Image (cartoon, grey):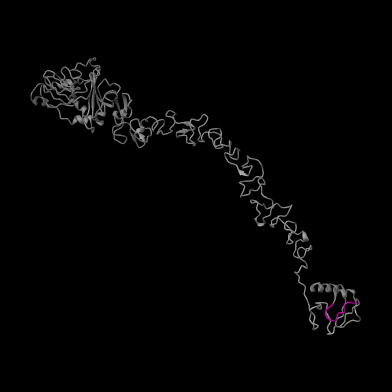
Amino acid sequence: MARSSIAQHVLSVAVLGLIVTPLNGCGSGDVTSESASDAGSSGDDTTTGDPDTTFGPTTSGMTDTLTGGMTESEGGPTDGETDTVDPDPTDSGGECGDGEVNPGEECDEGVANADNGTCTSECKNAYCGDGHVQAGVEECDEGDNNSDNGACTLSCAAAYCGDGLTWEEMEQCDDGNNDNDDGCLEGCLISGCGDGFVGPGEACDDGNDIDGDGCNNCALPGCGDGIVENEEQCDDGNEDDFDYCGNCIAATCTDGIHNGGETDVDCGGPDCGPCQTNDMCNEGDDCIYGECTSGTCDLPKSCLDIIENNQHAPSGIYDIDPDGEHGPNSRLPVYCDMDHDGGGWTLVIVSSDDGVHTWTWQERYLMSNNESVLGDLNELHRDFKSYALHVVPFTDMMFHHFPSDVWAAYSGMTAGMSDAATFMAAIQEPVCDFDYEGYKQTAGTLVASGKMCDSNLYFHLGDIDGYNTLGPCQNLNSSWNTATYGPVWSFGHNGGCPFDDPNGGGLGPTNKCAQCGPNTDISESNGTGFGRHMGLNTGMPGTGENNIRMYVR
């Protein structure tokens, strides 16, 4: 027995009163104990082998003291001194594996201790998380690495698909059931469009990416999904009802909606026809007259603007604005001839034998500086003057006679910077130049014949009357000078060509001529241009059936 164990044993016996040892010779008699022989003694003072051993004084005169120590049996001091040993409170008195649960041990199953048992090789109770897999109880144990999103859960169960715990390295999801419609499929995969299962947020799932088969991107077909299907004309995938596809109905130029590429309702843009005046526009091509000002279709500046932007525009009354939206002049109703020489002619004057003396010598400046207007656009067989005479720039003139329907056009007369009134006002009157050839006819049905010298157009002719000198022609006070004002054609009446009695070939004004009869200066000649000398005035006089119309372009 170890020294410390013997000391404890002797101590316990002493406490129980089984052994009484006299101290310092006190007491009488010897104490005899059978157990003393079992305990033994140290030194020469102890007699062994006799059951009746008597403890007495040692040869050194010192007595072993049981309280606090014991006498060494071997290797002890030879000087008779007492050796005292204190017990170690941390000493378990046993070891792990001895089958006894010693201090510091949680368990001890002896040889049954095992790291896969209930008591580990370190005499610790097994538990989930100790890093040891307890057989029959745990499927796994990774110690501190146990995790409900790992291979070994916090309950030491091996992770598997369907356990309700998502193993991050192996699973996308795990809802612990086999329902494929709840967002987590069998196999622990997150559901998605195209997997063939109708999951959260899906109206359908046909397991393919084919559009137009009744299930498009896991949504049922509908207007706005970007796929043309069923009764849809179009589907652009947005909610803009004013683009090229509104409510899945294709925009047209007749749907009564401002949509598609239109600049206004059913007009403008690349697909529809031009817009009318005051409609919205982006450029001139959006407008019927080619005039787009500040985003609004403006009025045409002339009849030529109209025909250039609409080759099928018919003859008739139109509104024009020669100086544009921001000019001082307001819109102007005019009559446009779209049938002769390419059309685009703006009517400025009508000279008629309607019985009203409008175009007289005294009022001759109505054709130039006098800006007064007269007549009615709805009665063009009567005398008429449009303000267009003063505001529409021109390069060409045309004259159309009724009822003969003979017409003549004269192109390239100006550079297009002047209106007809200003043009005529700039010509000095009367014109008596023998070399004056006027403006040559460029189109029409007029053909010089009879007393007509040529089909050229002249202005403000004086009466040469067969004279070989210019004096009588230039003298408006001459008795025989039947000069006229405005447009005129050259005839050889009784004095031969050129320029004899020009009033008969003009639009009405006749110089006051002493030998010509009374009131010639306040009366129209009723020549109606080239009509009288060519025998074209076949209408009833005084009714306006005989008239000639002057246009500019």
Does the magenta-highlighted stretch encompass residue 44? yes
Name the quadrant containing residue 290. top left
Give the total number of marks visible in the rendering: 0
Closer to the camera in the image, 485 or 258: 258
Magenta region: which residues?
41-50
Please indicate whether residue 519 sits to the left or right of residue 60 in the image: left
Residue 314 x/y as whole percent: 32, 24
As drawn, 265 above or below 403: below
Residue 14 x/y as whole percent: 85, 74
Does the magenta-highlighted stretch encompass residue 275? no
Which residue appears at 66% of the width and 49% of the height? Answer: 159
Please indicate whether residue 529 sits to the left or right of residue 273 in the image: left
As drawn, 52 above or below 457: below
Which residue appears at 84% of the width and 77% of the height? Answer: 41
As drawn, 191 above or below 271: below
Name the quadrant containing residue 529. top left
Please indicate whether residue 91 sits to the left or right of residue 26 in the image: left
Which quarter of the rendered picture does the C terminus lie within?
top left
Closer to the camera in the image, 213 or 406: 213
Please indicate whether residue 322 sits to the left or right of residue 217 in the image: left
Which secondary structure class fits the magenta region best?
A: loop
Residue 459 x/y as whole percent: 17, 26
Which quarter of the rendered picture does the N terminus lie within?
bottom right
